[in-house]
Image (cartoon, coloured by chain):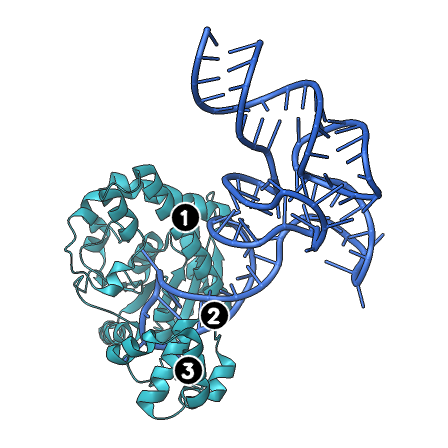
Chain colours: A cyan, B blue
Amino acid sequence: MLPLYLVGATGTGKSSIALSIAKNIGGEIVNSDAFQLYKGIEIVTASPEQIALDQIKHHLYGALELQEDCNAARYSEMANHQIKDISDRGKTPIIVGGSGLYIKSLTHGLSNLPPADHELREDLNKMSHEELISRLEKCDPVGASQINLKNRRYVTRAIEISILANRPMSEIKNEWENRNPKFNGIVLQRPRQELYDRINLRVEQMVKDGLINEINSLPENISDTAKKAIGIQETRLYLEGKISQAECIDSIQQSSRNYAKRQMTWFKREKGFQNVCLEKKDDPNLAIEKIADLIILPDNE
RNA sequence: GGGUAGGUACCGAAGCGGUCAAACGGGGCAGACUGUAAAUCUGCUGGCUAUGCCUUCAGAGGUUCGAAUCCUCUCCUGCCCA
C-alpha cells in the first residue's frame, strides 16, 4: 500500500486522526514534524501522548537528543529508512506532521546538494548584505536573478552551494529528484478562526500540562535547531522574569498562529494532496470516513 | 469641583499649518520556500466606476488660499490637588 501523508497546520488535529486511521488500516505512524523529533520537549511541541504511543507504533518521535542539530536531509534519511522498514513488514506507513520542507524531502527527494559548511557560513555572515549579493552575482548570476535577494539566508546558501560544488547553484538545483511521486496525501484543514481558537486553547493547556517545568529543566546546551521550537524562548523569558506568564502565553499563541498561516500557504501549493476540511461539528468518525474514502487502495501494478 | 497630560486607521504609536490617506511597529490577509524550515524572506492593508475622485486624525464651530496640525466650546480618558 502506498504511504499515506497526513499533513496540515499545527493544531488541526492530525495526531489523533492519524491514530484512528492507523488502527483501521493497519498502519504505523512516522513523524514529519521537525520538533517532535526531539526528546525532552514533548509538551511545547504537542507531541502525541503516551496512550497513543502505546496503541500504535510511532516512529521518529523523541528520536533526537536536544544537543543534536537536524535538517531536511538528515530527517529525510531517517524517515525514508523507517518508511521502507514499515512497508517491508507489510504495513502502511502513515507520515504525520506539518514541516513542509521535511515532508517534501520524502515525497520528492532533495537534490544532491552539498551540505552546510559552518565555517564557510560564518565567513559569509560577516559580509554585508550588499557584498553578499555581489558575491552571488559573480559566482551564480542566473541564481541571483532567481532567488529573492532580500532573503539573506537564501543568498548565503546559494553562495555556499556554488562554492562547495564549484558550479553555480542554479545549474545543480534544477528540479526535484522525483517529479511525479506516488503517494496518498491528505491536507487536513480547519476554518481559519476555528484553527486559531484551537491553537490558543492548546497553548493554555500546555501550561497546565507542565510547560514551564519542562522548559525550566532543559539542559543549557541545546542545539541551534532544537532551540527554535516555538515556546522555548518565550518560556525562558518568563523564567527570567522578563515577561509575565500572560505575556508568555500570548506570544506563544501568536507565534503558533503565524506559523500555522505559513504552513497553510505551503500546503496550498503542494500538488498530489487532497484537502479535507474538518469542522468542529464533525463527528470524529465521520472525519475518518471522509479520509478513508480518499485513500487509494493497493494497486496491482 | 480645581489643575494637568491626552484623544490619530483593527491595535500601539509618530506627525504638530501645505510635499498627509497620514511614518514606524503589531495584527490581519496574500505569497515565496531543495541540507537553518516551528527557520528565513516578500507584497498588500480607509473607500471607489481608480495615473483621478470621495470620506477620515474624539465632536461642533472658527481662523487661513490651505488644518490631523492654530483658536473656541463640548464630550470622553489618564494623572495630580481637593
- Which one is closest to the eye, mark 1 or mark 2? 1
What residue does disc 1 label?
Answer: A254
In this view, A251 is above or below B34? above
Q: Are marks 3 and 2 in contact (CB under 8 Å)?
A: no
At which x and y percent is residue A193?
49, 46
Splitting the image into 4 quarters, where does residue A26 fall?
bottom left
Q: Residues within 10 Å of mark 2 (few under 14, many from 20)?
A: few
At which x and y percent is residue A68?
18, 67
Q: Earlier in the sequence, mark 3 or mark 1?
A: 3
The amino acid pointed to by label 2 is: Glu
| Chain letter of disc 2 in the image | A
What residue does disc 2 label?
Answer: A270
Can the viewer see residue A276 in this picture? yes
Q: Earlier in the sequence, mark 1 or mark 2?
A: 1
Identify the residue at horizontal 34%, vertical 44% (top origin).
Answer: A202
Q: Residues within 10 Å of mark 1 (few under 14, many from 20)?
A: some
In this view, A272 is above or below B7? below
At which x and y percent is residue B7?
59, 34
Would residue A133 appear left or right of A73 to someone viewing this image? right
